Amino acid sequence: MTSSRSRRKTWSSIFVALCACAVLLALIPLALILFFVVSQGIQALNLEFFTNMPKPVGEPGGGMANAITGTLILVSLGSLMAVPIGVLSGVYTSEYAGTRFAALVRFAADTLNGVPSIVIGVFVYGIAVLPFKQFSAIAGGIALGVMMIPIIARTTEELLLLVPETMREGALALGATRARAVFTVVLPSALPGIVTGIVLALARIAGETAPLLFTSFNNRFFTTKLTQPIASLTVQVFSYAISPYQDWHRQAWAGALVLVTIVLLCSLLARVATRRLEGMHGR
Amino acid sequence: MVKRSYDLGFRLGTGLFGIVLVLVVVAIGFELTRQSMLSIQKFGFNFWRTEIWDPVAGNFGALPFIWGTLYSSILALLLAAPIALGIAVFISELSPAALRQPLVFLTELLAAIPSIVYGLWGIFVMVPAVRAFETAMPASLRQWPVLSGPPFGVGMLSAGLILAIMVIPFTSSVAREVLKSVPMAQREGAYALGATRFEAIAAALFYARTGIVGAVMLGFGRALGETMAVTMVIGNNPQVSLSLFAPQYTMAAVIANEFTEAADELYLDALIEIGLVLFVITLIVNSLSRLLIWSMARSAKTAPAPAAATPADAVA
């Protein structure tokens, strides 16, 4: 009796220890990745990296000014497309949450969220590259936009549903139309959260490579023309990483460091903002 | 009356943007089918049974890619699922309250790191380590088909490892949500019967089994479509091999590598057909996993909660 009890207790402790080990096992790669990205990246990261153009093979130095500009342009184009569609469809699915069509939209958003990014690249190639026989920044922006829409839609919906029903009812009781209640009362009170969600979506999308490979393609030169192929930080890192040149590898690590910094800053920012929001709503 | 038409306008106006979402999904399926017609008509189902991928001769068989995708994803799943579940249990059941938020943040960070950064790290840090591991493998073990072949470093093992790291945060965060939805009374009941901590958690896990399976499948769906990191470490060699050391290829990787090189129409269509099938497979896996998670959440919500559970909830 006692021995079986102590055996059960031992098993239980082993289980607890195993769970703690699982956490450590996942944190080791995280620490290793951050360590290598920072230690390798910092060596090639300087002001030149941000302001200079790529140098030809064999010449040391140079930077990714074109790729950084390209990523900014692509992400802006993507959000220009995704923010209105995402936010307004999120408004629909939260306002008419019980309807069958809202369920369909929600299903579409989840489905789109699960579509591999490379498939989105192929799709956008078919609709925005093939017809014009031209890789372009616009096509890249569309690809990123398609990936952003479901993230923004679901975040908006979730945050709108958190707004207390009494606020909406108050506005309606004062004679406001539904649209007015939503746009002047409900949406503004959820706005900080929605903006946080958008920032997170931006950070995630800035790190995407696969959908850009054959939509915005790549460009060794500086361009801001939307109808031309354009460089991006991620595609540049990819082509440098698989190249045989030491100097390009160093540049790739620097690019990775910039990407990780963007992601890290955005997540921290979002975390602080959510904390503050939760404090405000007293949750 | 005026008001009612306003409301209708609002509903239609916002609904229009909802339609866009639905249309995009439909358009992806339609467009991929349309663009891959040539390949579908020429090869039919044989496309998925043939092992030969010879763009020069115009012979395309996608078996090596579907094999590589499934092999790498299942390998990743085997490695990631126990770890992810352990993390979920630790964070939601065992961790001291002060540690909980930082741990959630750190695992989410793992999900936020871009795929290309994983790939870069994979090429320059993980692959050399894997190569050293493979070289150190005793010859007697190398006789085994799973461990046969020259130790390149790049190959199935590297792909499985990097996918596992990438999938862990997804599975663990969903599993955590699922565990959260298990009524406290389940655990309290187990404790009241004299269960140890492990037995109480096992009861909660058993209660949540549908949702847990859903969480694991969601990770599987992620692994199937992962592109950049896998492309950079799997070795990109179209062959069907059981060996973990062998360089192989996945569906996503072949599209990423060869799409811009596809010179003729048939080649391009064959690649797009691979994309179409990848789309359909992930669609099925993801829908199924969401269905499981949803049915679990619903049954937990509608389960009759004993009155005793209420004060405990209030304290928590």
Image (tube, coloured by chain):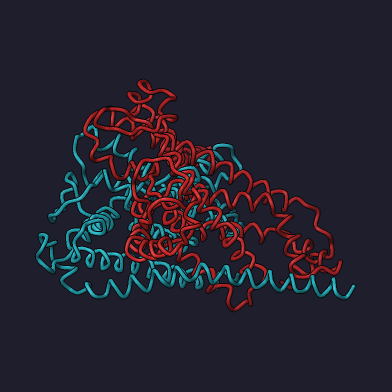
Residue located 44% across and 35% down the image: B277
Q: Is residue A109 left or right of residue A168?
A: left
Q: Residue furthest right?
A: A1
- Between A244 and A108, the residue placed more toward the observer is A244
Residue A205 in the image: x percent, y percent? 36, 55
Residue with the most extreme front position: B140
Where residue A2 sits in the image (x, y, percent)? Answer: 88, 75
Residue A122 shows up from this direction: yes
Seen from the viewer's position, the closer of residues B290 and B117 is: B117
Determine the colour of chain B: red
The percent coordinates of residue A48 (x first, y second) are 15, 71
Displayed quadrant of residue B81? bottom right
Give the residue at x 64% y 46%: B292
Query: Number of marks in the image?
Result: 0
- In the rendered image, the quadrant that contains the C terminus of chain B is bottom right
Report which colour depicts chain A. Answer: cyan
Q: Is residue B182 left or right of residue A165?
A: right
Place residue B264 in its image quadrant. Answer: top left
